[in-house]
Amino acid sequence: MYRDNERKDRRRKNVMGSYNYYKMFGCFNRKFKISDLGPPRDVIDVFNFYSTGESEMSPDKFLRFLVECQREEGTTIEDAERVMDRVLNLSRSHLTCYAFTVNDFFHYLLNDEINGPIKTQVHHDMTAPLQHYFIYTGHNSYLTGNQLSSDSSEVPIIKALQRGVRGIELDIWPNNAKDGIHVLHGRTLTTPVTLQKCLKSIKEHAFVKSPYPVIITLEDHLTPTLQAKVAEMVTSIFGDMLYFPKESDKDEFPSPDALKHHIILSTKPPKEYLQSKHAGKERSSADKDSSDDELEDPRSNSDQDDDDVGCSVSDRYCANEVSSSTTQPLSEILGVNYEDYDDDDIEDEKFEHQKGLEYKHLIAIHASKPKNGTRRALREEHRKAKRLSVSEQALQKAANHNGVDIVRFTQKYILRVFPKGTRVTSTNFRPLTAWMHGAQMVAFNMQGYGRSLWMMHGMFKSNGACGYVRKPDFLMNKGPNGELFDPKATLPVKKTLKVKVYMGDGWRLDFSQTHFDAFSPPDFYTKIYMAGVPADVAKKRTKVVDDDWTPVWNEEFTFPLRVPELALLGIVVQEYDVDKDDFAGQTCLPVSELRPGIRVVPLHNKRGEKFKSVKLLMRFLFV
């Protein structure tokens, strides 16, 4: 009965048709016929092939399609029937057999819960030490907007954890009375939030998205007395969730699997804190940073991605950030000295050391900065497992001259890369350079948007979006002659990906009729780009389909890949306009996780939030 009524409704729509009306000059209407959403020619051909020319596809024939076309090895007849049951929305108790019509088959293809483009389960080996994984990491995780004048809050931390971010950064400073602890971007106009509020939010939301460990990187500007307060605070708030480092951790990091449902602290030990304070003004400008991050002069290289969009600075300081000709350092603009932070409370070093002992014993991942330059830091052998933090420029410089040294370092230690200080509007850098050299913690501003952040979202859709992605073996192993992976080396094509864009749908449901054009339906086209090692980078685009809410392109593109393990497939749909094209959706997918076959690809808005209805039907084929 259900099937008969559904078919009648479809026939009625085909006979009557439907139209969009657009008012021109306020006096007459333009009429545009709405295209009926139906399967593309390729889908009909596939259905006819696997149904052997019959009008319905039985479960055994659907199973053959899943195994041969979709490459879903290991699927059983029971699995096939279960999928058909979900698509048909019928109870098993009322049926003795299942069958797909071509329209049922088409509806299955458009169901992203069943037929999405990537694997949705954790499937990487999670028992290797932490340095074997890329870790989803945030930068200044508490900021709601720009780096100079926005509010500090627990809300961005919660949002990051709900997305699956596993690395949370907190800058901790004494409050005005120096008897409590605030989280804020120090020596700026950002408003503070209490450390206690941040820690409680982390406890509540740490494992809603993923069971794997959350690493809190502390940029510590506290006296030993306040450090002792931090120790008391984290132990009382986190309780059994807090990971207490073991003796064996000195030689090798534990695994994500061993650290499930634990919270890990990472910062510089108090001894290094005291030494850095006593060094004071004697530090060279090359070593200048606070505990982890550098705050750089705006006169330094301030190029940024054209596609990166950060958060606006609503006060007068913004002009100094974007001007490439400014000669006044940021420190003078804000009236502070970034090299000086003399703590008047430091009186007795022995007392301070005693106070810092408990705090020190809670630090599971010891952090450091490159004291004698990045090059030497990357080449030094360290006695224990540790984390090194460098800026994006330091990484790029090292990659240009000593790329293999970075790969060697990241085989044993953790490398964190953070945005340069001039990104005060919370933009981001392109992460591929860091990843192709093995950097585990690429710290990003999560509150903005832009292509770099879309890449970050794409990478960490991998491995069930659990926040940990196992690094490719070539980044962790040596070759037969002891050689290491060299990102600059000329490599042969390892795999070729063919991407076919069939059609798109859903804009009519998620947008108003005049959102893209006041006088006609939208003119959509799709851009496909490949990000990865330089030799794999490519851009393609479809033709523009005029005046159609349900565009059909049927275009195929080929991408030869040298390092498919690090490749990301970016997809952006835009609406053509004479002046400036309008954004209509985007997504980024890890090539290593793509499910072959005909798949539905849900699109997202600029901030990475999934649209309710907008999607593309595509095919992925590896040859």
Image (cartoon, rainbow, N blue to C red):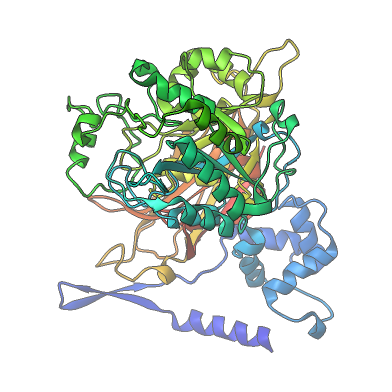
Q: Percent x, y for residue 335?
A: 20, 34
Relative to 144, residue 50 above or below: below
Which sits in the foreground, 126 or 585? 126
Q: Percent x, y for residue 530?
A: 50, 37
Residue 553 is at least partly visible in this image = no
25 vs 294, left or right, is left
Relative to 385, residue 222 above or below: below
Residue 48 is at least partly visible in this image = yes
Relative to 104, residue 321 above or below: above
Instruction: Using the rendered view, name the quadrant where residue 188 is placed.
Output: top left
Q: Residue furthest bottom?
A: 1
320 vs 237, left or right, is left
Q: Residue at x 36, y 46 (%)?
A: 175
Q: Residue at x 72, y 80 (%)?
A: 90
Q: Percent x, y for residue 280?
A: 36, 21
Q: Residue at x 54, y 39 (%)?
A: 568
Which sits in the foreground, 522 or 137? 137
Quarter of the rendering occupied by the N terminus: bottom right
Q: Residue at x 65, y 59 (%)?
A: 115
436 vs 253, left or right, is left
Q: Percent x, y for residue 490?
A: 57, 17
Which sits in the foreground, 351 or 568? 351
Which sits in the foreground, 108 or 295? 295
Labels in figure, total: 0
Instruction: Using the rendered view, name the quadrant where residue 307 is placed.
Output: top left
Quarter of the rendering occupied by the C terminus: top right
